[in-house]
Amino acid sequence: MMFTTKNVGAIHRSGEDHARAVCSSSSAPASIERRVPLTEASAIPERIEAIDRGRSVAGERIRAAVTWLFLAVVTVLVVTPMAAIVFGAFRTRSPGDPRATFSLQSIEAVYLGLFNGGWTQSATLHTVLLAIPVTISATALGLFLAWAVTRTNMPGKRWFEFGFLLSLLYSPLVGVIGWTVLADPAAGLLNGLWSALTGASDPLFNIYSYGGIAWVMIFFFAPYAFLLNVGGFRSLDVTLEEVAAVSGANLFKRMMLITLPVMMAGIAAAALFIFTLALEQFAIPGFLGTHVQFDTLAYAIFLRTNAYPSDLPGAAAAGTLLLILSSIGLFAYRRLTRHSERFVAVTARGYKPGVTELGAGRYVLFGVCLLIFIVGIAAPLIAVALRALLPVRTMTFDPGSLTLDNFRVLFSAADMLLGLRNTFYLAFGAATACSVIGLVVAFQITRRKSLAKSILDYMIALPIGVPGTVFGVGMLWAYVRTPLYLTLGILLLAFVIRYLVYSVRSIGGALMQIDKALEESAAVAGATPFKSFMFVNLPLLRPVLASAWLLVFLIVMREISSSIILYGAHTVTLPILTWNYLNDGSYGVASALAITQIGIVGVVFIVLTRFFGADLRARAAE
Amino acid sequence: MQTIDRRGVLGLAASALAIGSGIRSSSAASEGIETIDVTPALISAAQREGKVVVRYSSPVDEMAQMSEAFYKRFNITVQADRKVGVLGTQQFATEERAGRHIMDVNYSADPTGIKDLAEEGYYLRFTLPDLEAKLDKAAYLPTLGYCPKWTEVVISYNPSAIPHERARELFKTWNGLLDPALKGKIGLNEPAGGGVPFATYLMFYRNPQYGKEFLAKLAAQRPRLYPGSAQAREDLGAGAISVFIPNWESIAMIGVLRGDKTAWTYPDIAPAFANTYFCISKNAPNPNAARLFAAWFFTPEGAAVMQLAQAKPTLKNQPEMRTAVAELKKTDWWRPYPEEIRWIPDTDDWIKSSDTLIPEMRRTLGWRG
Amino acid sequence: MASISIANLRKSFGRVEVVKGVNLRINSGEFVTLLGASGSGKTTTLRMLAGLERADSGTISVNGSVLNGEGNFVPAHKRGMGMVFQSYAIWPHRTVYQNVAFPLRMKRVRPAEERAKVERILELVELPVAKFGDRYASQLSGGQQQRVSLARALVADPQVVLYDEPLSNLDARLRESMRTLLRTIHKETRLTALYVTHDQLEAMVMADRVCVMDQGIIVQEGAPRDLYDRPANQFVAEFIGQANIFDLSDVSREKGAVRLSNGISLNIPPGNWPNGEATRDRKLVIRHHHACVLTNDAPAGADNLLPGRIKDSIYLGDRIRTTLTLAGALEFVAEGIDGPSTSDIGKDVIVAVPPQFCIVV
């Protein structure tokens, strides 16, 4: 590399520290990797800057004002329903009720109840006992699968990549149907098979148990850890692992000592994500846990909103308790990832994804993955498909009784097309809005730190910390007076507020991994922050944006708990239809709907992965 | 979407119009209680409104049939909005307190909530002509809510696990559930799971031949507890459990038509009650259509629609027209509902005791805390 | 100390064969450079030696034991080598000390010994543990990071050290000081080393022996001076150093002379001919600095004089680069110490090329 102008040489003669001061706009510890782009690029922009200076100062102000306005709007939107919930928790009756007064009664019942045997005591204990092991196991499983699919030469990777995400396509209720058909201790098909084979009278599996609930939840949540870490594995700088290999670390040690710690930001985000989902999940423990009197907090809260006597202030107060639990998770996440620079793994150098050659081990890995897929994902799905083809559930399988009646009922239902259309509008809308807003917010939070932005960072995590039903009630209280109420708009707003944190976290995680040098070099080259964002970050972020989009899309496709409060006759969604069919005992039709939904979403999913799949291949070729 | 103010004004205007045309003020008007009769004037006023917004928690199919029949008969669209449990009442309360008048009729199962909201003045005080002759006292909350169908609790069993003769013998009383052979094979809807289970457990509490101890004895049978009855019926059909309580007859009949392998018997005493009531919003945006909808199902014509959905109308002297009954008559195990077993819960008792009794019942069945 | 033997090594990625039969022997304690343009297969060869890629065919053995051969593949972590990457590959979640100590921990070295070794090696790369030990990569400059990387590669006394373009991310000044450091260390330790680079200067400064790779094979190997003075082909001649390369219209080994396309004949001493008999497509190579621009008359009896006219001249501080036009529109570049009038554009001059510097390839 030759220096063409004297002033560039001057920067270098005065040493590293000077260079650092010149090119580092923030006080963050400067990575010296930014020096190379600087040397190449700093000569020209000085001239450009001189010309542009007058214009850019005003532009800077406007940009800052727009940014702050935007962040303020996001904050207000996020805070409003949460404030309504907290307000509700301190009332004797629902907000708006003229007889309601301020009182600590609900708060006391929830919090003192933890210690004096109140309604929250065992439920909270159960919630924690379930959420922690489920989080750890599901995260580990998802990571393992993500690694197998991205970083090994296992056969059938592309198929697995799709297969492991299948259970994201249907609601937890559907998983419950599937597992009940398979592993009911008295009538489960698997148990029937087991008895027939061995003559044993005791069932092999009992889905109605702590283990059963945890099992279903682990397989239900592992795909999230998978989805959230596939990108991380793909974009990891493999030389970090290679140098460990050369230094004498075997595959396992490389994984434990290098790969996982370096990816900790992404892993912790996935774990936090699963932890909050596990805390607020009511359907799985609700349907499977009542048999063994295993109450969780989310289910107990659901009962308070849904069964009578209703107790919305109590539900809101308990919502704050769950919020505290999930905040503990958030706090742990913050501690783990507080040194963002220690997770810089995508350097300014460019990188190439590396594949571990496994030799014969790749067939062993294939076998393990296939087993996980069959046991955890395919089996319940097949059971649901079977249920969709049966008029009534039976203990034995009789091919002669298969019928398409359930599908006929489903497609003749008046709401089916309406629900389908609404669900797609909402899923596309929320996914897109979350990605766009999430991109801006994530960039502001991770790159231009300030106290206010740190507060916003905490704020956006709040809505997911309360159970969906409580959040829905908060939205209802907050927005009943607005024209949004009972339109798709309020559902869209609810989903965006609630799931914004997902896109912010995953995009933020990726931003942490992209060396600041990349965008700073663009800035030095005269690019406005917007341009440097568009040209430097956006292309690098494309895979993570795509997966963040997909994540929100998939979640909205099956969202029940908030929708159930906020939907109206014209805004019915597919998950609500499923819920209604299940409530009416039409398990067959609900299963048929689930299969239909999986089919439709599967097509969308495949089309999308084709698009960004091609994108990923392009990156691999770099 | 219109602004709130404009909507309010429109609502008022519509009410004024309604009073002038369709709605007949009765002698009870001095007490603010309106008598709603299905008159040609009401029908034509309702038709001018063209639609009615109904919140409901009853089964989707039933409401679909009711809506369809209503539309066919009057050419008035029913916008049916399903809110299970107490959600409909809660939503309505929130709307009204915020000045949003959206719902016309609430067809829901929350007597406590209904009374509360009536006191706040959000529900219309109304009655039906010849009420005494038409309905049993237990079928309505006076001046507030009127229930078009009975919910009659039965004991459901799976005939491949318990043959019909054995079941009829065993379940002459609820004590049959304590048979040691049924240990681990009973499904119970949990007390917080809705009005039907609470009514049933309340019946044990209030009848000395069973008493609250009966629940403890049931608990000793290690029953499976279900959060909702639908899952229990599914499991019963599959044979995962042999018997399920409390089921109710009309929904069991729908299952029979669908091919469920279940049957049921009537014990010595069983709750039969009005589970879901029609209530009319005082500020209904479609006041005449609301009134027509709420009143029509208490005419023979409307009651027949309930029967079309296999529900048993509360309207007295309605001839049996349910197709499921015709089917069941062909079986050797079914017999008509024996009126002498009917136990009607006291609504006031219900409202007063549910707060304390539900947690107690859950504790008895094994929940901690 | 280890000797390396690589025989007929091949590797394809998909349909593209990147390494097409590399043969290479590295003696114990020797410092060998693989020099080549990007895509020449040099890095892939290095990665196969490290065990990061598996060869399609051929063998790699170190001290006679086969690391990669028929049905035999020793994975990277069992090869006991050290490696320095272009990207430094400093683990961002570990301190300098932890980075450097890692290979020792993998070998389960006792803590006291570990401490001593890490301290010594960090001292050697001029990053005293007291000052730098607790820093993270983000608190280091690029040069410091690369020195950590170097320390990590050397700390566990590897049999072989591998360098994958270690200096190419550093700026010129740092590169020079790192080169010096590397030379010092290798003179001291006499570790067997393979060094991959695309920078010919780096290759020549560092290595005992340079192997030039092109399109998947080693096209020439030898001491830096041999490569420079006796390039085996046009590629090497152009890749290493700067040279004038001329097509020849007539080649006669017997007469010891060649004729340029413009008809001028030049004498070539017997030692400057390539092996092999083929005479087609031979080229004449003359290094820029081997030519001398004479503004006065040529000394009597001098061989190989080329008349030309100065077209351009560039002042490079320590020397001057003169571009001349020869008869037949041939261009010639000469570099030498600044002299009078060599920068007079348009001036007719004579270029003298001593025969010993005229090489036929």
Image (cartoon, rainbow, N blue to C red):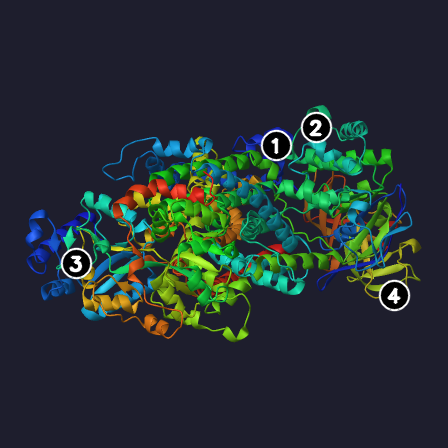
Q: Which residue does the numbered mark 2 point to in the structure image?
A: C133
Q: Nearer the viewer, residue C104 or C273?
A: C104
Tally of marks: 4
Depth check: give the residue in front, A417 or B179.
B179
The type of residue carrying mark 1 is: Ala
Q: Which mark is residue C278?
A: 4
Which dot, 4 or 3, sits closer to the camera? Answer: 3
* Circle 3 SS class: helix
* Residue identified by numbered label 1: A10
Q: Is residue C336 left or right of residue C135?
A: right
Q: Toward the viewer: A89 or B12?
A: A89
Whether residue C173 sits left or right of residue A426 in the image: it is right
Residues at marks 1 and 4, CA–CA distance in whole angstroms: 53 Å
Amino acid at dot 3: Arg
Residue type pointed to by label 4: Ala
In which quadrant of the rendered image does the N terminus of chain A lie? Answer: top right
Secondary structure, mark 4, is: loop
In screen coordinates, is A281 left or right of A72?
right
